[in-house]
Image (cartoon, coloured by chain):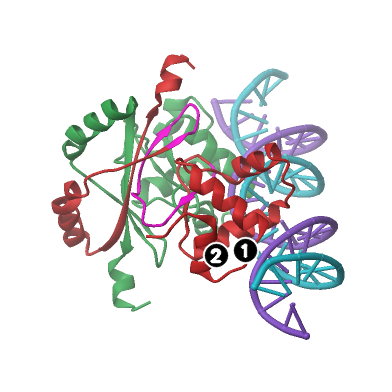
Chain colours: A red, B green, C purple, D cyan
DNA sequence: GTAGTTGCAAACGCTTTGCGGCATA
DNA sequence: TATGCCGCAAAGCGTTTGCAACTAC
């Protein structure tokens, strides 16, 4: 449960208040859907903010390591980042435009089932990830 | 719904009956868990079967394209392949040893919920993927 | 001043491609 | 003998690393 306010990120993590960190903070503060490094580069380019991609990668790793971001790697799509590890781990993925839409799911649904699975397979379950693949509203309309 | 018998793969796909194709057929015929290119190279090495990795990649793509294999790319682990696209899409992933264990789940559980999600987000759901992360039996014992 | 941060170039690992040669049907 | 398949080398792509320079505190 962190604050996505860029300045608060720095005070929480006791790290320096740099241009890149602030810029990334603003992006994740204002972006609802998980984004890729390419997306970030695009945004920075449109803002005329010149920054080396190495620094972006490094900062994303840093923020992920410090539980500010959540790294998502899923079937076929490129690595995405979203704010805060405590977010729901369920997504809708549009297989036409590769958009990821985070959704909230009542995890109660899995309770009974995951207990069964855990026992049957002798497997300790720590977390789960549920993804629905299909077509988003826009792509349905565009007949893409 | 294909037959995993190597010779039947060839007759179904009307493709040539090559050493590599037969060898991969046998591997997937006998392997229950999804495996990586590195795993396959390992197996071939142990069998003293010399084959170029390019050919392995090409053959896996070919079999995937022809619905004989299922390509799995998930959170943090390397790409894996398993026989047949129609297999259940639910897995247990051990975050210690990276093993993937396919499991059967009663998809009825999701029926109501996925209908709700579909309506709420104006999203046509085609398929879903459910993954449980945790520790397998072996890794629990090894205190790794 | 000094750690934390950056840019650049180079390396990395996994995967794909181009092409000439070989083997299966 | 004619495609389909193969090996090899090289390139592609996203990501990481090493190092020297810089800058926030």
For residue D2, what is the image quadrant?
Answer: top right
Vertical relation: A57 (above or below) B18:
below
Label 1 crowd (10 A; few <14 / some 14-19 / many >=20): some
> Depth check: B37 or B50 in front?
B37
- Whether the residues at callouts 1 and 2 have beta carbons within 8 Å, the answer is yes
Give whichever of A86, B77 is nearer the camera: A86
Of labels 1 and 2, earlier in sequence is 2
Q: From what the image shows, is residue D20 above or below residue A52? A: below
- Circles 1 and 2 on the same subunit: yes
Q: Is residue A83 magenta?
A: yes
Relative to B111, A66 lies left or right:
right
Q: Is residue B49 magenta?
A: no
Q: Position of residue A75 (x, y in %)?
A: 45, 42
Magenta range? A78-100
Q: Position of residue B73 (x, y in %)?
A: 46, 46
Tell me residue A56's x, y (percent).
65, 54
Which label belongs to residue A10?
A: 2
Q: Nearer the viewer, residue C7 or A4?
A: A4
Residue that appears at 27% across and 26% down: B119
Question: Could you tell me which residue is drawn at 17 percent across and 59 percent down?
Answer: A120
Horizontal relation, residue B77 to residue A53: left or right: left
Q: Residue A17 got which mark?
A: 1
Q: Chain of mark 2?
A: A
In space, the residues marked 1 and 2 are separated at their CA atoms by: 6 Å
SS at mark 1?
A: loop
Pointer 2 local density, CA inside 10 Å: few below 14, some 14–19, many at least 20 = some
In which image quadrant can residue B137 be found? Answer: bottom left
In the structure shown, which secondary structural element does the residue marked by tag 2 occupy? Answer: helix
Is residue B50 visible to us here?
A: no
């Amino acid at each position: 449960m962190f604050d996505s306010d860029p300045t608060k990120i720095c005070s929480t993590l006791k790290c320096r208040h740099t241009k890149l960190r602030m810029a990334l903070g603003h992006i994740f503060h204002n972006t609802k859907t998980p984004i890729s490094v390419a997306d970030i580069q695009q945004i920075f380019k449109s803002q005329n903010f010149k920054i080396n991609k190495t620094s972006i990668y490094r900062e994303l790793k840093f923020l992920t390591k410090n539980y500010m971001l959540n790294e998502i790697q899923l079937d076929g799509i490129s690595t995405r980042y979203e704010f805060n590890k405590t977010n729901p781990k369920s997504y809708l993925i549009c297989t036409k435009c590769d958009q990821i839409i985070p959704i909230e799911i009542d995890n109660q649904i899995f309770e009974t089932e995951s207990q069964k699975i855990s026992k049957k397979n002798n497997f300790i379950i720590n977390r789960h990830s549920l993804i629905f693949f299909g077509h988003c509203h826009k792509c349905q309309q565009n007949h893409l």
